[in-house]
Image (cartoon, rainbow, N blue to C red):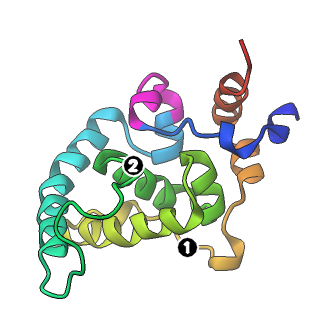
Amino acid sequence: MRWLLLPLKDIMVLRYHNLIQNQPLFQALTGLGLTEFDELVGTILPCYTAAEKKRLNRPDRQRVVGGGPDFELEARDQILLTTVWLRQCPTLEALGCLFGISDTTAGRYIRRILPLVETAGLDTMRMPDPGRKRRRHLSDLLQETPELALIIDAFGQSA
């Protein structure tokens, strides 16, 4: 299993623009087809924009709007991350590895996007939660999703 020995920094292939090239992998990770996911994004994005505007304009904010670091993932990829989390039940560490972000950042994105998914009435895509201690680790995801292991293996190859 050579792909498990890759440095974690090399495992950052899960972005919308990468996954749309491999529809079977996209379907396996999200449980949605590309059209369904695009409709989900179309539904959630206006709510996301409004929630961000409200968050950035709150009266107790310490920085001016535009201050502070930018998000590591664009809104579409944050929705993708949350969808993968809802469907695959991975640990935040595994999710962070796959998206090339920290586990803390992955959790922050989920906390932002999940209420928007629920408000839109789309939380039916959630799989039964196995509980915090039973979430899937990266090795489990790679073993159960061979397409993902092949993509990561190819991504980690040096030219």
Farthest residue in the top direction?
A: 159
The residue at 64%/35% (across/down) is 148
Q: Amino acid at mark 1?
A: Asp
Circle 2 — which element?
loop
Q: Is 100 rendered above or below residue 50? A: above
The amino acid beneath tag 2 is: Leu
Q: Residue furthest bottom?
A: 60
Q: Is residue 121 left or right of residue 103?
A: left
- Alpha carbons under labels 2 and 1: distance apart: 25 Å
- The residue that appears at 80% across and 34% down in the rendered structure is 3
Q: In the drawing, what numbered circle is on residue 16? A: none
Q: What residue appears at the point 39 percent right and 29 percent down from the top-left corner?
A: 17
Q: Quadrant of the image for the C terminus?
A: top right
* Local SS, label 1: loop
Task: Provide the residue span drawn in magenta.
Answer: 16-25
Q: Which residue is mark 1?
A: 129
Q: Mark 2 or 1 closer to N-term? A: 2
> Is 64 placed above or below 38 here?
below
The residue pinned by badge 2 equals 73
Q: As drawn, is 99 to the left or to the right of 113?
A: right
Residue 36 visible here: yes
Magenta residue check for 46: no
